[in-house]
Amino acid sequence: MQLQKRTFGDVTVITLDGILDSGTAQAVQADLEHLIPDQGRVLLDLGKMSYMSSAGLRVMLLAYRRALASGARLALARLPADVREVMTATGFLDFFAVSDTVEEGLEALV
Amino acid sequence: MSETEHAAEITRIDAYPTGLISGYPVRAGRVLPFGASAVPGGVNFSVYTNNATAIVLVLFRRGEPDPVAELPFPQSFRIGGVYSMTVFGLDPETTEYGYRAEGPYRPADGHRFDPRAVLVDPYAKLLTGRESWGGGEPRPYRSAVGYDDFDWEDDRPLRLPPEDLIIYELHVRGFTQHPSSAVRHPGTFAGLIEKTGYLRDLGINCVELMPVFEFDELDNPRHDPDSGARRYNFWGYNPIGFFAPKAGYAASARYRTQADEFKNMVKQLHRAGIEVILDVVFNHTGEGGEQGPTLSFRGLDNGTYYMLTPDGGYYNFTGTGNTLNCNHPVVRGFIIDCLRYWASEYHIDGFRFDLAAVLGRAPDGSVLANPPVLESLAHDPVLRDCKLIAEAWDAGGLYQVGGFNDYLRWSEWNGRYRDAVRRFLKGDFGAASELAVRVTGSPDLYGPQAPVASVNFVTAHDGFTLADLVSYNDKHNAANGEDNRDGENQNNSWNCGAEGPTDDPEIVSLRRRQVRNALLLLLCSWGIPMLLGGDEAGRTQYGNNNPYCHDDPLTWLDWDLATEHAGLTRFVRCAIAFRRAHPALRRPRHRVTGQGSGWFPAVSWHGTRAWAPDWAVHNRLLATMFYVREQAGHDCVYLAANAYWEPLTVELPVLPDGVIWHRFADTAAAPPGDVAEPGQEPPIDDQARIRVGERSVVALVAHHSSF
């Protein structure tokens, strides 16, 4: 799993590339903690994720909790259809602003 | 870094293995909690059996049929009858497990150990094998470890006063599986959430879910004799995993997030002000009788979990082949652990106990004067605010309605309420006088516990739907594949003149009235009313009174019915709102002190002349007036039910000056005049008497004339 960080104006875009499951969750979680700036605005781009397990869902929720605590705003872009489905069914999606493209996500965070 | 974060990073000093078993690093585990739990670095397994001689932990990689390893528990890892072991390096997300139990196969002594079988952990929090409802080849059940960190935010059980409840019984799959439900995730916990608005609009504040513990829908070998279509165990009264939510009811089970999905459903229902009661089956398991499969309990400790005859056979007080040995101390502990888990981990508001009379039996099947399991549940601190509702009978002939050991705590499905309303509606002799007692919370049955000990209902999943109750004299269960032998024969139903669907306008009109009569009586009675989901929309099962095995439109709610029968749905909505608006109908207890100078007694009975009820056996009129004086003022409701085939003129009680009778409902009137929006009831012209139509019910409310 690769994490890439880019900045668009005030917004930090973090792209997750690869597999997010119990094998990679801990490392991704640690990386995200460093990459999510306090009080900033962050868009997680999931468009390059090939697989996410329930451990991966937990990473998303922890990132949300962390952002909430530090005053950051977090949104998700380009959710794989299957992930979106399971996040809808479990209600996890209710915690996030979601967009279909990175551009829309950037607008939503402005 | 804060202090708490720092503390969390300190490694446990026991988080290292002390040896290897079958190539896996292990150490002696922790006995509590039972089941499998994720711990730092691995998984702790704990399983008890007082009669096995050895236990083997069988590990699987997710979804694979053959084990990756078998780890015998060293005897040094055993404390008492509990085998526990921490296995390091296991990924909870990709691990599945089971147990083999070694011991004698001597049925006459109660032992049926079979080490060939990989057993389900009775404490498994998740089960795999049936993730997709009815899907494909049955796979063996495997136990799995889930996450237990659901974010409830500020959710808590609602603790609604029992007298305020309006219970709606539903089947999770049947409720939204029909294409007309138009939900995103049909037939699932997630699908139910999408119907929260419907339930709220109707006025429901409590749903009672038919069994949601993991069960095998594929364990029914029967077929439709005509079409050959397979039959299922649709209802799910055959539990396998008492701690595991039914995976096939989750849209997200392939992610193993069925627990999260279930919890989110509870959370969303709570947000809408709706409590969740689970229908729990602790009278038997899905292992069946002698010929049934060895899945879990039979192989772990047969003689402990089941009631056995002196020669080692199974007592069958449940009609399913086995009977759970509920008052054995070990099983009692299991039941309490299980309910505590659902109450605390899933925020469940209450439980309805299927065939609860079994919980009053001793290991030899005899009836106990003081059943320990019922007493324990009544006083358990975790369960203290949970509603406990007994189906106070069993299939062994024990009928305890009104005589159940309630410890001043349990409520009951009042089967005698159901029978009384049905007999009254079809005009039976003597039914009016019994109904008088039933509509006032059955004090003859429940004494000081009345009325809230009485869960009143006219229909439930067992038996006819309300539409069928007034359309069929006999059950029509041939499609169940048992030559119409299954299902209740004593239905107290009446088809109103023709068996099944008819175009005869008089019959159609009478049925429409009878349905409303039943609903109005139910929603104006003291006690806790329970509706069978779909009755508010006129749902039919075409005379099938035991459709437990149908996974098809016969058991799926057709949501177009609510539009087709919009008048009936409106009637139910208004009657619920009426109940909620009138404290006189929701008495928590019979003796209410501080009544002060009221207009009337809390309840009074009347006849064609006010204050003169007729208790003669041929009388078919029941007129009841409910009254309470509260801080907010006087509340007074008058209910006249005429089961006679002619209209009656009924004299009304005289109200104090300035107060007049208004008509809330009259089932003889054509919709929309059959019911008023609560608070907008029109005054009646003649304050001295009313006409109550043939086989009709009228409900009046007293308001000040300036209203």
Image (cartoon, coloured by chain):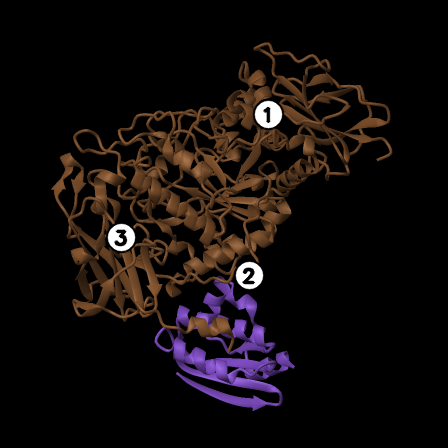
Q: Which mark is residue B47?
A: 3
- Residue at image point 63% right, 78% down: A108
Chain B hue? brown
At label 2, the amino acid type is Glu
* Mark 2 and mark 3 on one chain: yes
Q: Is residue A25 left or right of residue A77?
A: left
**Chain ID, mark 3:** B
- How far apart are the alpha carbons under marks 1 and 3? 49 Å
**Residue B555 coordinates in the image, percent (x, y):** 44, 44
Q: Which mark is residue B439?
A: 1
- Secondary structure, mark 1, is loop
At label 1, the amino acid type is Val
Give the quadrant of residue A73. Answer: bottom right
In the foreground, B230 or B5: B5
**Chain ID, mark 1:** B
**Chain ID, mark 2:** B
Q: How busy is the neighbourhood of tag 1: few (under 14 within 10 Å), some, or many (20 plus)?
A: many
Chain A hue? purple
Picture layout, residue B432 above or below residue B537: above
